[in-house]
Amino acid sequence: MYKYLREDVKKLKPYQVNEIKYKIKLDANEGIDWMDGLNKYPDDTCKSLREKLGERLNRKPSEILIGNGSSELIGYIMNAYLEIGETVLSIWPTFSMYEIYTIINKGKYRKFPLKDMVDLDVTAFIDLAKESKAKLVIISNPNNPTGTVISMEDIRRIISSLDAMVILDEAYIEFSDLPIEDYTREFENLIVLRTFSKAMALAGIRLGYMIAHENTIDCVNRIRSPYNVNTLTQDVGIKALDKHEEIDKNIEMVKSERERIRSYMESKGYRPLPSQGNFLFFKGTKDLGSKLANKGVLIRGFGGELEGYYRLTIGTVEENNGFIKGFEEVLNETEQSY
């Protein structure tokens, strides 16, 4: 959306790659082919991938921008819209990279705490955004690391109430009960981010995408690095979009396992937050993470204000059973030490 674009970025034009048909290509200082055509630069605009995604999302390719994971796209959004000293507002706790990118871009980061790490006071959140004159508002939904969700009615209320760019990070949307749709045609100030890393289980190829109004895509394209997504990643992404039945099966398995592990932990006296992601967030002892690591089981531990909290990714049945085994051993050793 041009209204919120940085003044100096307004003067920029997107990098243009020559797309003229050719017989001999000697215009880009590329090397001699020796490995399946990979000497050539990738498709700069990810045209085929955007077309494939557009069919699936009922969106025009011009409403989609591709990045190396949604994290790269967050950085691009900051680069395009955030002036020095302007405010970025988000909830707390949430994805730590929002604050890091804000600091890198010399902005001011504001945190609005969730009540009991679950509920958002929408009215107070909107009031703080207005009071702080937030330029960017970022909401992870489902939220990382808590797994909790904000209703789409409240999301719409936030978008329509604010004179700001709203970034809705839906990295875990496929694991939730939320509708997988977007309102970017209705709200030009909305950007939706999604990824191939979670539900599609392709974190290794680093692929994410942005859905937004065509004008917003044009704005972000002005600061996007040329050829930012490599050829192999684009090819795998296209092929993955044809594997929807297999992906849907994995999603349902994760949901089922998430509830099984939640029930197990509750039976042991732990209280994971209600999660609609592919993970559970819970409070444990400060040494739980290190004790599990000694048994070859890794879970994510947090520090600072979240000291003693952990995020457990839901894996395969076998991996989850391995977690249960390690967790049982830690509990038994703890009881024997008393």
Image (cartoon, helix red, strand yellow):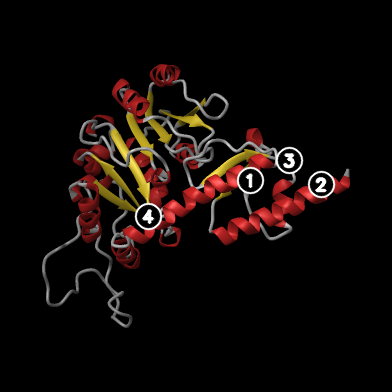
Identity, as a three-letter code, of the amino acid under mark 2: Thr
169 sits to left or right of 60: right
Q: Give the mark nearest the N terminus, 1 or 3.
A: 1
Mark 4 and mark 3: Cα distance apart in space:
35 Å
Residue 278 image point, x, y percent = 49, 48
Residue underneath mark 2: 334
Q: Give the mark nearest the N terminus, 4 or 2.
A: 4
Q: Give the mark nearest the N terminus, 3 or 2.
A: 3
Mark 2 and mark 1: Cα distance apart in space:
18 Å
Identity, as a three-letter code, of the amino acid under mark 1: Tyr
Farthest residue in the bottom direction?
34
Question: Do labels 1 and 3 touch, CB within 8 Å?
Answer: no
Question: Do labels 3 and 2 touch, CB within 8 Å?
Answer: yes
Residue underneath mark 1: 264
Tag on residue 89?
Answer: none
- For disc 1, the neighbor class at 10 Å (few under 14, some 14 to 19, many from 20) is few
